[in-house]
Amino acid sequence: MRRAMDEKKTNSLRLYFRWPVFLLIVLALLAAGGFFIEIRVGAALTLAAVLYLIAMLVIYLVFRRTIRKRLVDFGASYAQAQNQLLRQVEVPFLLADESGEVLWANKTFRTLFNSKKRVGPLSTVFPELESADFKKVHKKQVTYNGRTYTLHCAPFRVESARDLGDLGDQSTPSLYNLYLIDDTDLLYYRTTLEEERIVMGQIYIDNYDEVMEGIEYVRRSLLAALLERKLNKYFSQYGGLVRKLEKERYLLVLKQKDFDALEADKFSLLDDIKTVNIGNDMAVTISIGIGLNAPSIDECYTNARAAIDMALGRGGDQVVIRDGTEIRYFGGKAKTTERTTRVKARIKAHALRELIEARESVMIMGHPNSDLDCIGAAMGIYRAAKFSQKKVHIVTGEVNNSVKPLLERFKGNTEYEEELFIGGQRALELFDKDTLLVVVDTNRPSYTVCPDLLKRAESVVVMDHHRLTKERIENALLSYVEPYASSASELVAEIIQYYDDNLKLRPAEADAVFAGIVMDTNNFEDKSGVRTFEAAAYLRRNGADVTRVRKLFRESMQDYKLRAETISNAEVYKDCYVIGICPSRELNRNQTVVAAQAANELLEIKGIKASFVLTSYEHKIYLSARSIDEVNVQVMMEKLGGGGHQSVAGAQFTDSTTEEVTARLKAVIDELG
């Protein structure tokens, strides 16, 4: 390529010297033509051409040697300057063949690396290049004598280097030019900036009010001081700064390098804080939300707030780290503490009423294969929206047999709209920008009946009792996610009480909400707290009948036999876990409920810590997980892409077989069990 360029320049120079000859020929032609016009014109042009010829010959003969000498001098000086530049440039520069043998190096390289006249293989200087293929290497980081360099490499034709006299064998087909950039200082300052980056966090004492109420008044200030001292002592050893914002909330500031050590400790403070005891019956638990790797301190603090909200939404007693878009969890294995205060429920009820009354219509949506808790919560919100005189629709998918008796009480009933329950497609047709979408019994977009509604909705309300995960409904105007609650129906029952003093559920609606609580608490045996029974008492005052609700839970002989078959074929794994598979029946649309019931019954076996039942339904594998108090099945299900509560959880799988899911489940048990 270089030779072609040189030849092009030479041809251009020759053409430049031939232009006077071309001009002389033009003048001669003009003189000849002038004679045809008039003799005097032709004579004048001929004289001009002769004078031009004489001048051209004089200049060419007299100054020819001078011009040539100057051209030669320029070419020589240009080559010398080019050669001198390569040798004296401050950047280490060298030429090597395909094997890495150094053929030529400039003065800077030899001085910097104490090389003799012949350097030899480049790998003697940089061991990282021992097996390097220079055809593929364009940029590579190498080290020498404690400093880090970036090696840049590019192909170099031998013909281009003929000016260099000490290249060696000119028959080599190709060479590579390489130069080094010292990045030691750049990497040092970059690392320093990364390590000095600010990390923001928030610390929240989950059960502050509950713990304080359980001890003597004179000891409360002592307990608060002990908690603050333990927080300061723990984080100060990692260079962190803790400042109190409210009675139960603290601000945490530390550097990235200190946070790395803190994360390596896996936040042992979560367990250590529970040892603080000055007579309190309830152990203190804390939640920590941390935001890092944000462009600004303000965004870092925003991430920390989002992280602490997620930690509290997952039940507390854990650390949530929001690292950009990535979310990591630590802890979360303790039993969720029930809140005794109802202030939050009252605030959420008033906020929900404002949102409903600001819209023309309301749509309520739960999860596919809706269960009694989902329908019960939806009916509670329905009554609140009807109290505000709004058009209401409940979006449902395919329901199992256990829900049909409840739905039959509303369908065909003249007291309710004909299109009270609609499918996803009809919902999309009726939905407009002035519709409020209320999502109940799920907080994950992919777990809703019609995810497209969420994409179209400008106003969304979420009410759920499942712990938050990485996937959640974003930008909800109102989010009431409380893992301490037994069910979504319990949350809705509390909301209704504060919606308006004159709001009263109809008996059929009260039965539906009550049935949701009964189902998710396994007839008040699991996750039943004070507020659960208070919600049940409120529903009883509104006309809920225990006998009618009990009849909703009666099952067919086919379901009873299917559950018995599932239990009889269950496998005991590692002496304390039981895994069952509910057989698939094409005509049985109730087998997911049967699987959950079987998981509950398997817990009655002595020595069993957790039960897991799988069933295949409509090309999906459903996994129900249950425990009493020794195992956190929610953490296990999160490992498998699901979620739930500490004692009641589940997961769904597509494109898998029951054998594959069972193998994955056993691997998680081996890891966490």
Image (cartoon, rainbow, N blue to C red):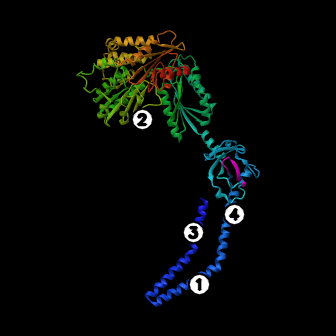
Residue 27 lies, with reference to residue 641, above or below; the image says below
Q: Amino acid at mark 4?
A: Gln
Q: Helix, strand or loop at disc 4?
A: helix
Provide the residue span drawn in magenta. Answer: 96-107
Q: Helix, strand or loop at disc 3?
A: helix
Evaluate whether residue 287 shows in this view: no
Q: Amino acid at mark 1?
A: Ile
Of the pair 476 and 179, the residue shown nearer to us: 179
State the separation of the CA atoms marked 4 and 2. 69 Å
Q: For residue 12, which numbered disc appears in the image? A: 3
Looking at this view, name the residue that lies furthest to the bottom.
40
- Mark 4 or mark 2, which has the lower sequence index? 4
- Rate crowding at label 1 as few (under 14), some (14 to 19) or many (20 or more) other CA atoms within 10 Å: few
Residue 112 falls inside the magenta stretch: no
Residue 573 lies, with reference to residue 317, above or below; the image says above
State the separation of the CA atoms marked 4 and 3. 23 Å
Mark toward the viewer: 4 or 3: 3
